[in-house]
Image (tube, helix red, strand yellow):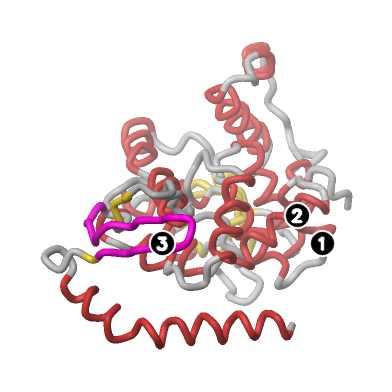
Amino acid sequence: MSRKNLLNLIQVDADLPVKTTASDNKLVGQVASTVREEKARQARADDIERRLAEGQAVVDLDTTLVEPSFVRDRMAGEIDGLLSAIREQGQQVPILVRPHPEKPGQYQVAFGHRRLCAIQELGLPVKAIVRTLSDEELVIAQGQENNEREDLSYIERARFAQRLKERFPRDIITSAISVDKTELSRMLSVAETLSPDLIDAIGPAPGIGRRSWQELVELVQKDAAQDPVGLAQSQDMQAMNSTDRFKALLIALKPRRVARGLPDVLSTASGQRLGHVKHSKTKLEITIDRKEAAEFAAFLLNDAVALFEERRAKNEQKKEL
């Protein structure tokens, strides 16, 4: 079966009647003509799924019998808007499931995970199309539906690719997320270099693209002494939304430029003042404010030599590589 568009595998059987009306055709034309805008992309994705449902058996399933895909594709996020829409209008678009390959009488989602979560929370049965899909067909359909909606962030797509890599060859992965092999390699590099704890602490960061994530990778690799996970998990950063948290972390990890001969305030990412730095051509002076950071001052006094030796040992190891 062709992998160019696995959404096409959900076709109306030849012996089943297909309901087509002039109004349906007009709606499809309207969606196609306004696809440039975000709302039109969402409408197009919904329309595609509705057309997939035409002539198919749409059944009501107990949500306790439906499991997510075996490959997670998105990070946790709010579904309040979707909950309100389904509560007011009902489930307009069915989800796609397959019979569970290991649990008779149960099902596994190919796409529609957010709808399933919302419907589970509302305590309703979920409307679904049931199709027999191989593992490869499931993940490609899952990825292509996400691409139609364009609602996964860059890091969510990168992690999806990383999880697919554990089970599938690269041609399946490139089909699932609709990227070429070069872009796939970049995505995998980001997802595999940054620790899962750091990515989880940052969150999906919608709107943050490849270059910004690669910049974060470079900053993390450049200075092993920093604690990006601790920064991202800090109370101040966790109070931000995911996108702002990413931006704040990037700023916090960037080396501070200190003008020669001029004092500069030494402070934490949250704004706590530690002291002053004075940088000249021949020396660097750090003055710690004991009123503001007494414990840090004591730590620095006691461990300065040990820190120096640790840094020198790391530099020696790098030279040997």
Relative to 303, residue 159 above or below: above
Depth check: 266 or 46 in front?
Answer: 266
Q: Are marks 1 and 2 in contact (CB under 8 Å)?
A: yes
Q: Residue placed at 88% from the left, 49% from the top?
A: 2
Q: Which residues are magenta?
A: 271-287
Q: Secondary structure at mark 2?
A: helix
Indicate left or right for 237 with 195 as reference. Answer: left
Dot 1 surroundings within 10 Å: few (below 14), some, or many (20 or more)? some
Tell me residue 281's x, y (percent). Answer: 48, 56
Relative to 309, residue 56 above or below: above
Inter-mark Cα distance, 1 to 3 = 28 Å
Indicate left or right for 146 with 168 as reference. Answer: left
Quadrant of the rendered image containing residue 69: bottom right
Q: Secondary structure at mark 1?
A: helix
Tell me residue 5's x, y (percent). Answer: 79, 43
Q: Nearer the viewer, mark 1 or mark 3?
A: 3
| Residue type marked 3 | Ala
Tell me residue 26's x, y (percent). Answer: 66, 12
Q: Which mark is residue 184?
A: 2
Q: Residue furthest right?
A: 1
Depth check: 79 or 277 in front?
Answer: 277
Indicate left or right for 318 with 195 as reference. Answer: right
| Residue type marked 2 | Leu
Q: Which residue is mark 3?
A: 201
Q: Which residue is mark 1?
A: 170
Q: Answer whether residue 238 is visible to the viewer in this image.
A: no
Relative to 315, residue 41 above or below: above
Q: Residue placed at 42% from the left, 53% from the top?
A: 249
Q: Residue furthest front?
A: 282
